[in-house]
């Protein structure tokens, strides 16, 4: 294989990739629009699922780019540009968020939480009638008594439903300042402004250097990386709280932001392995991406996938051990609610156990044309999609009042695929368009030659 000198997509099949993605995106959004007209609530959950699938990939790409600048990494220069392409389309999610903004009343029960208002009124009436001490006694007994059907508090009998309403009202009242419409919208604006600025700044510094060879551009990216990483971690965490955790507003988990971070890194590393393999197979990247790069990407993918499993298990174990009702409801929906149990088991087996076996050996990351590595990355990426479905869609079953052990608790719909193609097509069209406008490796980076010569010790 002769090495390319320009690393451009012109004259290759990659040059039209953005048009194909745009066509799929148009068809997908058209189908999603038809679904919205037929069932607005189902559309809302299907669209949110598709949105977070690709948003996490783009945010993961940004984390990866910042990590390389934080560490002044030389080995990763030739694969960093691929991550920059997937990062560069991050601003498009501000537009893709509009259908979610228009569907908040379908997604988030706290947006018009009449149930909480009714529960709050019931609690107030109970306090007025029996005094605050009685209300507090009822709260404690309601949490711990096995006979929750009828609680005896100061001579007043409360049903299990009244107790649950009262507890729900107390939890929601404590979150009322955060789960307010104006604050919710304001936070979303801050997220997208920060993400847009960060993605555009980092991408411009890298691509401009292709022509100017200005070393100051590398220094600028490295200088902004520490504060930018801190800001990206905060905005990603709170966006996960807003758009995923608040689907079940009573639920909370202090480790959820870390879990989402791990998810973003696993997703983008899988994408980098598959894109690197595809570009090298087509000759687009020439000899710039070598076995050494695949070896290190494979090690990172293996490590972050184990980290994802560790964080996910820690969240499950601590919630199970504490057995706090407001926390356990999350896993109740995904284990006791009929077929979701099998999805939960599949995530453990196919997201952790099988990839662990595939990626553990050094040989699979270096030999056989990295085909085993590509297989592991493809499986992890597919399970990333399943995991996002697992995070979002059980809340639809809960919103529809579908009880445990009913097949309807897991009811895939054609709108899920329509939204996935719609959001993914638009996002990938933006990614591949950027790819057609710039070299696929940062030829102006001062460490580019060193990266091509990189060898694992």
Image (cartoon, rainbow, N blue to C red):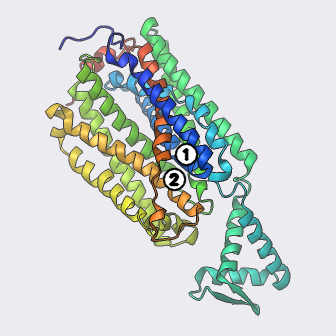
- Tag 1 or tag 2, which sits nearer the N-term? 1
Between 192 and 393, the one lying in front of the other is: 393
Q: Who's the residue at 71% across and 84% down the image?
A: 137
Q: Answer whether residue 404 is visible to the viewer in this image.
A: yes
- Classify the position of the C terminus by image quarter: top left
Q: How many marks?
A: 2
Where on the picture, by quarter, is residue 438? top left
Q: Who's the residue at 51% across and 43% down the image?
A: 52
Q: Who's the residue at 58% across and 28% down the image?
A: 196
Q: Answer whether residue 365 is visible to the viewer in this image.
A: no
- As drawn, 378 above or below 179: above
Between 63 and 353, the one lying in front of the other is: 353
Residue 390 lies, in percent from the top left, at 45, 55
Residue density around tag 1, few if under 14, some if 14–19, many if 20 or more, within 10 Å: many
Residue 211 lies, in percent from the top left, at 44, 6
Between 150 and 317, the one lying in front of the other is: 150
Badges 2 and 1: C-beta atoms under 8 Å apart? Answer: yes
Residue 434 lies, in percent from the top left, at 46, 19
Report how far apart the C-alphas of labels 2 and 1 lie in the structure: 7 Å
Where on the picture, by quarter, is residue 287? top left
Determine whether the residue tagged by mark 1 lies in a helix, strand or loop: helix
> From the viewer's perspective, is 349 left or right of 260?
left
- As drawn, 29 above or below 114: above
Residue linked to disc 2: 392
Residue 449 lies, in percent from the top left, at 29, 14
Determine whether the residue tagged by mark 2 lies in a helix, strand or loop: helix
- As drawn, 209 above or below 390: above
Where on the picture, by quarter, is residue 254? bottom right
Residue density around tag 2, few if under 14, some if 14–19, many if 20 or more, within 10 Å: many
- As drawn, 61 above or below 166: above
Residue linked to disc 1: 48
Which residue ends up furthest to the right in the rendered image? 128
């Amino acid at each position: 294989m002769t090495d390319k000198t320009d690393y451009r997509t012109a004259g290759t099949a990659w040059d039209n990739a953005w048009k194909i993605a745009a066509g799929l995106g148009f068809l997908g959004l058209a189908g999603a629009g038809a679904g919205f007209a037929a069932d607005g609530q189902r559309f809302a959950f299907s669209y949110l699922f598709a949105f977070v699938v690709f948003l996490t990939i783009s945010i993961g790409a940004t984390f990866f780019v910042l990590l390389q600048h934080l560490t002044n990494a030389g080995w990763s220069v030739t694969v960093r540009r691929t991550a920059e392409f997937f990062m560069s389309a991050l601003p498009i999610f501000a537009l893709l968020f509009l259908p979610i903004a228009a569907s908040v009343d379908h997604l988030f029960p706290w947006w018009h939480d009449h149930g909480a208002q009714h529960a709050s009124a019931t609690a107030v009436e109970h306090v007025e009638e029996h005094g605050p001490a009685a209300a507090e006694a009822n709260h404690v007994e309601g949490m711990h008594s096995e006979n929750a059907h009828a609680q005896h508090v100061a001579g007043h009998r409360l049903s299990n439903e009244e107790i649950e309403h009262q507890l729900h009202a107390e939890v929601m009242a404590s979150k009322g300042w955060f789960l307010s419409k104006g604050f919710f919208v304001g936070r979303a604006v801050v997220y997208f402004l920060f993400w847009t600025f960060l993605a555009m700044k980092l991408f411009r510094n890298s691509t401009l250097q292709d022509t100017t060879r200005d070393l100051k551009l590398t220094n600028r990216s490295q200088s902004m990386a520490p504060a930018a990483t801190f800001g990206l971690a905060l905005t990603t965490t709170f966006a996960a709280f807003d758009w995923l955790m608040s689907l079940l507003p009573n639920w909370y988990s202090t480790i959820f932001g870390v879990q989402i971070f791990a998810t973003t890194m696993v997703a983008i590393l899988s994408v980098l392995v598959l894109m690197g393999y595809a570009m090298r197979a087509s000759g687009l990247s020439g000899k710039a991406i070598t076995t050494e790069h695949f070896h290190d990407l494979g090690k990172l993918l293996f490590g972050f996938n184990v980290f994802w499993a560790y964080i996910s298990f820690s969240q499950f174990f601590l919630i199970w051990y504490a057995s706090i009702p407001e926390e356990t409801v999350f896993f109740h929906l995904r284990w006791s609610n009929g077929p979701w149990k099998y999805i939960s088991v599949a995530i453990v087996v196919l997201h952790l156990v099988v990839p662990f076996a595939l990626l553990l050996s050094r040989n699979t990351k270096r030999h056989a044309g990295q085909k085993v590595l590509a297989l592991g990355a493809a499986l992890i990426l597919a399970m990333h999609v399943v995991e996002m479905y697992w995070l979002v869609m059980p809340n639809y079953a809960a919103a529809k009042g579908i009880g445990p052990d009913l097949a309807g608790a897991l009811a895939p719909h054609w709108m899920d695929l329509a939204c996935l193609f719609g959001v993914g097509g638009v996002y990938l069209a933006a990614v591949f368009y950027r790819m057609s406008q710039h070299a696929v490796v940062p030829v102006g980076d001062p460490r580019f030659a060193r990266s091509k010569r990189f060898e694992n010790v």
